[in-house]
């Protein structure tokens, strides 16, 4: 019996792995998009390039993705709740695939920016959706490790794009990367729909089949499923009375719903936390170093450094640290991993700033390339182990099901906007105030975000999504159990509370 149970657990784990792989391979393709600018921009600077660019145009090619992310965020927010997770996931393929092919056909800067914009739209669509799909369809005990695959996949994509760029032209690189997107398309086609979404639409039987197909049957799974169904039935019953109302009345109640919802801690607290996490993530510089890797290496290490080799070595380190993060996510608490890696990131920022300042002003008693290389390596480790993995893991855990699409879509705007600001401003600040001050400014943003997050973010490791939601409401398991006998007596009042509609 024990062997059968173990075999059954492996089957369910493999099903969750297949589901996660479809998201992860799609994210790898988007990692290629991020890393591609580090190959494209130096190639465009060559005299023999058929497309010539200015410094301002280079920054637009690198940063336009961040602006496009916002467009993708707005597109996906209503789609993931109306069309479902699977069909929305399929829609993310079209813009990025179109972008790769457009890159091969254009012969102007405007064409390059347009292609990158399309790819950014796709990234903006996948940003909130990927973590939600994994968070809803995997077991709570393995959810952290699966969600870490988001940052791991981005790392693999950046490394793949950088590595291929050292051997092939940027046109060949774009063609090869397009095949990764096509592979993810094939996997998504065979994915099931999210059981949480099916239940939210009243398709309880279908949701039950998918849920137990993915997770297996056991006391924990049955309890989690029953709680999910009970919560959704309460929400659906509370909304039935609103279906026959006139349009004008519906509009008034909709705005009343928004006003009431915006005051609820389970809605606004996760959004604030994710705003801070995404801002910290971008100003920690993971996409800055991915986009301007060779320029940064030449500035910090020196003009004689083998930038291409060091860039690939940093990508390999990033991959190793991402794999390490998967195991750390299983063993360490989310808060412990976040704040320890954040402290190391700030330390390495300050270290790089002091080193570059001392080098530029001839204040170093001795100089050795291994000093800046070690600082950059420490910095990359801190980014990868915690700062880039925790936000994506938390985003799949922290939002209640009722607000998951809306809350995820709103909060990911910070990821998109700060991507654009950080990547666009880096060369501008570097030229205006110098690299040391730029690093200190970015470190200050990271410290500010971490300071606020420390007092707001709860621990989510090994907790069900319902338990996390209840913690934002200020409810403990004891409170919920004591309230259960009153549910039947206060059904009408609970319906009013859950619907957020003013009667």
Image (cartoon, rainbow, N blue to C red):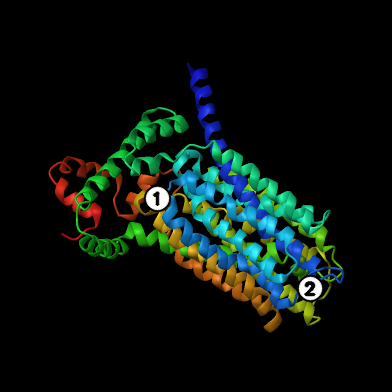
Establish if 177 lies above or below 14: below
Quadrant in the picture for residue 267 = bottom left
The answer to which of 337 and 364 lies nearer the viewer is 337
Q: Position of residue 86 (x, y in %)?
A: 49, 43
Q: Is residue 380 visible?
A: yes
Query: Residue shown at 20%/52% (left/top)?
Result: 244
Tell which of 438 and 87 is nearer to you. 87
Residue identifier under label 2: 52
Q: Is residue 482 above or below residue 403?
A: above
Front-most of residues 273 and 23: 23
Label 1 sits on a secondary structure element that is helix
Based on the displayed image, in which of its 4 quarters is residue 314 positioned?
bottom right
* Residue 82: numbered disc: 1
224 left or right of 420 in image: left
| Badge 2 or badge 1: first in the primary sequence | 2
Q: Quadrant of residue 348?
A: bottom right
User: Where does the C terminus fall, quadrant-wise?
Assistant: bottom left
């Amino acid at each position: 019996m024990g062997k059968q149970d173990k075999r059954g657990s492996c089957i369910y784990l493999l099903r969750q792995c297949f589901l996660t792989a479809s998201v992860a391979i799609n994210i790898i393709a988007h990692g290629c998009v991020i890393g591609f600018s580090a190959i494209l921009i130096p190639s465009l600077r060559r005299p023999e390039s058929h497309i010539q660019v200015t410094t301002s145009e280079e920054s637009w090619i690198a940063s336009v993705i961040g602006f496009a992310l916002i467009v993708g965020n707005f597109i996906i927010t209503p789609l993931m709740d109306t069309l479902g997770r699977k069909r929305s996931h399929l829609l993310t393929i079209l813009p990025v695939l179109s972008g790769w092919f457009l890159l091969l056909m254009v012969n102007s800067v405007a064409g390059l920016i347009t292609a990158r914009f399309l790819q950014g739209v796709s990234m903006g669509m996948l940003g909130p959706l990927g973590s939600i799909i994994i968070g809803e369809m995997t077991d709570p005990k393995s959810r952290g490790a699966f969600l870490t695959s988001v940052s791991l996949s981005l790392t693999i994509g950046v490394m793949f794009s950088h590595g291929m760029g050292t051997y092939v032209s940027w046109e060949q690189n774009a063609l090869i990367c397009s095949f990764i997107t096509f592979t993810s398309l094939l996997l998504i086609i065979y994915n099931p729909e999210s059981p949480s979404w099916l239940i939210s639409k009243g398709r309880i039987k279908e949701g039950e089949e998918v849920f137990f197909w993915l997770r297996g049957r056991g006391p924990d799974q049955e309890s989690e499923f029953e709680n999910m169904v009970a919560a959704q039935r309460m929400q659906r019953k509370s909304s039935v009375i609103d279906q026959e109302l006139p349009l004008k009345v519906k509009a008034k109640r909709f705005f009343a719903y928004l006003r009431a919802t915006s005051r609820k801690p389970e809605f606004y607290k996760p959004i604030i936390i994710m705003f801070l996490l995404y801002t910290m993530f971008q100003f920690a510089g993971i996409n800055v170093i991915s986009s301007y890797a060779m320029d940064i290496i030449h500035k910090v290490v020196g003009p004689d450094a083998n930038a291409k080799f060091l860039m690939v070595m940093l990508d390999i380190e990033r991959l190793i640290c991402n794999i390490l993060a998967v195991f750390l996510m299983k063993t360490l608490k989310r808060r412990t991993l976040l704040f320890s890696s954040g402290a190391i990131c700030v330390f390495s920022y300050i270290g790089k700033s002091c080193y570059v300042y001392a080098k530029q002003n001839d204040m170093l008693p001795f100089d050795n390339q291994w000093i800046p290389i070690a600082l950059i390596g420490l910095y990359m480790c801190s980014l990868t182990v915690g700062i880039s993995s925790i936000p994506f893991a938390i985003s799949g855990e922290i939002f209640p099901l009722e607000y998951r699409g809306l809350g995820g879509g709103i909060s990911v705007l910070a990821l998109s906007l700060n991507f654009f600001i950080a990547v666009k401003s880096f060369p501008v600040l570097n030229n205006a105030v110098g690299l040391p001050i730029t690093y200190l400014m970015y470190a200050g943003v990271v410290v500010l975000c971490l300071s606020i997050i420390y007092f707001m973010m709860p621990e989510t490791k090994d907790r069900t999504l319902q338990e996390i939601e209840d913690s934002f409401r200020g409810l403990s398991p004891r409170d919920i159990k004591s309230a259960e006998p009153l549910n039947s007596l206060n059904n009408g009042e609970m319906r009013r509370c859950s619907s957020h509609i003013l009667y």
